[in-house]
Amino acid sequence: MAEKQALILVTNDDGVSAKGIASLFEVVHGMGQVVLIAPDSPQSGMGHAITINDPLRLYPSTLFEEIDAMACSGTPVDCVKLGINQVLRRKPDLLVSGINHGANTATNVLYSGTMSAAVEGAMEGIPSIGFSLCDFAADADFSVAKKIVASVVDAVLKNGLPNGVCLNVNIPKLTMKEFKGIKVCRQAHAYWEDRFDERKDQFNRPYYWLTGKYIEMDQTEDTDLYWIEKGYATIVPTQFDMTKYEAIKELESWSL
């Protein structure tokens, strides 16, 4: 009897027409039955947002002729929810998100639509992976990233993932010759020191543009930022349970 193909849901936050999702599709297309649902426009920085005040729409996409592909008017998490509940009407065997144009290291994971889609999958009990390439260019070279995707997806299909855990995979901007390997590590402690540029529009009305500086708080040798700088791709096991368990007893001692 032929082995049943894995059902793989593909999404992203850069939009259905991004080069990154085309590269991701190219890899996983031969690894199972693929259904692709992605935002119809870029949704970077949307985090775990869902659409509750506007109608959600799904449109067939002709960009991926070999499979069922749809563009969604909502966020990456909307894509996952609609995919599971309305399109597939079942949970897929694997959810992959990306390949994001730009890193999702350290606390960027909290803002990332790419990773929020993967976290949503983990919340649903689906083995889920978010992939990001440390290159914001629209025409970025995804050659190394595609090899990492193939390796990690194959491993997850064979081994599964712990319940409630998804993988945050970041790939450095390197050639295959420069690439050193893969490290499983922890998320770095880093954050954006925000700054807003005040500007004027054509009617002389003020508006603000978010900018800032990325501050790395620790310099230890076991984080995603450290290993990417050394030429390695990183895998950070990520969970949606944000409880700080060590603080429970301290808070229980308070007079509340």
Image (cartoon, grey):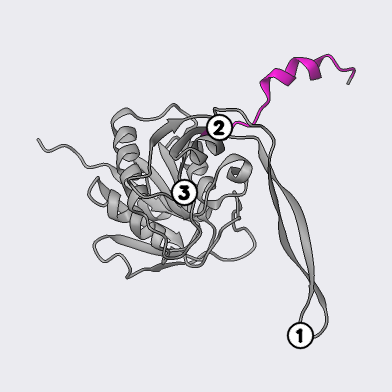
Q: Residue at x 46, y 49 (%)?
A: 132
Q: Which residues are magenta?
A: 238-255
Check if residue 175 falls in the magenta segment: no
The residue type indicated by label 3 comes to Ser
Quarter location, residue 189: top right
Tell me the SS state at disc 2: loop
Asked if one can make out residue 104 in the rendered structure from this viewpoint, the answer is yes
In this image, 212 relative to 155: left or right? right
Q: What residue is shown with label 1?
A: 202
In this image, 107 relative to 222: left or right? right
Q: What residue is shown with label 3?
A: 132
Check if residue 248 falls in the magenta segment: yes
The x and y percentages for residue 59 are 41, 69
Neighbor class of circle 2 (other Cα within 10 Å; few <14, some 14-19, many 20+) is: many
The x and y percentages for residue 183 are 43, 31
Q: Earlier in the sequence, mark 1 or mark 3?
A: 3
Quadrant position of the C terminus in the picture: top right
Q: Residue at x 50, y 29 (%)?
A: 185
Q: CA distance from mark 2 to mark 1?
A: 45 Å
Tell me the SS state at disc 3: strand
Neighbor class of circle 1 (other Cα within 10 Å; few <14, some 14-19, many 20+) is: few
Residue sitting farthest toward the front: 178
Q: Earlier in the sequence, mark 2 or mark 1?
A: 1
Quarter location, residue 93: top left
Q: Residue at x 52, y 34 (%)?
A: 238
Q: Are marks 2 and 1 in contact (CB under 8 Å)?
A: no
Q: What residue is shown with label 2?
A: 223
Q: Earlier in the sequence, mark 3 or mark 2?
A: 3
Tell me the SS state at disc 1: loop
